[in-house]
Amino acid sequence: MNKAGLFRHPGDKPPLLVLLGPTAIGKTGLSVEIAKRYGCEIISGDSMQVYRGMDIGTAKITREEMQGVPHHMLDICEPDYPFSVAEFQERVRQLIFDISSRGAVPFIVGGTGLYIESICYDFQFSEVGSDEEFREEQRRFLEEFGPEALHTRLAEIDPDSAGRLHANDTRRVIRALEVFHLTGRTLTEQLAGQTRESPYNLCLVGLTMDRDILYNRIEARIDQMMDQGLVDEVRGLMARGLTRSHISMQGLGYKEIAAYLEQETTLPEAVRLLKRDTRHFAKRQLSWFRHMKEINWIEIPEHAKLSRILHKFHEILAGKFEGLTEYIGEHEYPQI
């Protein structure tokens, strides 16, 4: 029997594993070990790792770290391309079908809540349209009063969306305002109206950790990114003509370092802001995941042994999938 056949379900829905968690919690290393044991192919659920040449700032997995496990949705477009959640959904739907047809198990790993949830519950994205005059009005407001004032506009009509979006993510803030302008319904209301019936035999596993420990890991990761050459990566992107107006350059790590390279701030201040904003981002990620009621949570202690986490993961799977009778023995592995 192939691995996918172990994940049986009375309704014969195709299996879909999902591993969620905030940035820097250790999803990458754990996901590879899980994939090797259960015959999975990994689909990145990160909205930034789709861009070629943006490796350090997105903490993209390396070829060596993959250990031969197939990975998808990495390096699929150039950083000047306006990649969207609707396109992500379309591509991943096809990937799930293709992976399942090969007898493997599709396994989404990431931290971009809307992107992952759009797959899990097959969200329907209506063609709201656009109003370029309205957008230009918001851009003029942004230039005159700044991103915080624009973010406050959104908070007044849609506090939930404002809570999910950083003030510096001005493109998405303007889009949320535009959706309300065009439809009279907030983006939050439209998301709440989506069905919660999954087309898949879905198993959601979330990783959580003491907040102080997580924040220490975030700061250590950013220090590592700086040592790996994040400044040179951003400098190279800007030399290719990319600016902070591009969607890709609005990601964490890119907009802060770009501000330094444009002499708007010092490098220590840029790093300080990056650490602060990444901590805030992790908090928003956890807030998003908390409203996804079907997640099975695994608490990651400070000195977590991979063997124990794998054992907990197997217990969750065994309780979900009737055919999963094969036990993956507990061994000692390096800490994650």
Image (cartoon, rainbow, N blue to C red):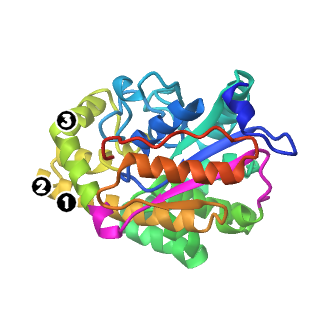
Which x, y percent locates residue 167?
Answer: 41, 64
Instruction: Say which of 45 and 216 sits in front.
Output: 216
To which quarter of the image does residue 332 belong?
top left
Magenta-drawn stretch contains 11: no
Q: Which residues are magenta?
A: 194-215
Instruction: Give the SS element for disc 2.
Output: helix
Tell whether label 3 touches label 2 (CB within 8 Å). no
CA distance for labels 2 and 1: 6 Å
Tell whether label 1 touches label 2 (CB within 8 Å). yes
Which residue is drawn at the image coordinates 49% and 25% (left, top)?
69
Instruction: Give the SS element for disc 1.
Output: helix
- Quarter of the rendering occupied by the N terminus: top right
Specify the amino acid type for callout 3: Gln
Q: Which mark is residue 272?
A: 1
Q: Residues within 10 Å of mark 3 (few under 14, many from 20)?
A: few
Which x, y percent locates residue 244?
Answer: 35, 45
Instruction: Say which of 287 and 315 sits in front.
Output: 315
The residue that disc 2 covers is 268
Which residue is drawn at the image coordinates 45% and 41% (left, top)?
48
Q: Sequence-wise, which precedes: disc 3 or disc 1?
A: 3
Q: Residues within 10 Å of mark 1 (few under 14, many from 20)?
A: some
Specify the amino acid type for callout 2: Pro
Mark 2 vs mark 3: in front:
3
To which quarter of the image does residue 170 belong?
bottom left
Tell whether label 1 touches label 3 (CB within 8 Å). no
Q: Which mark is residue 83?
A: none
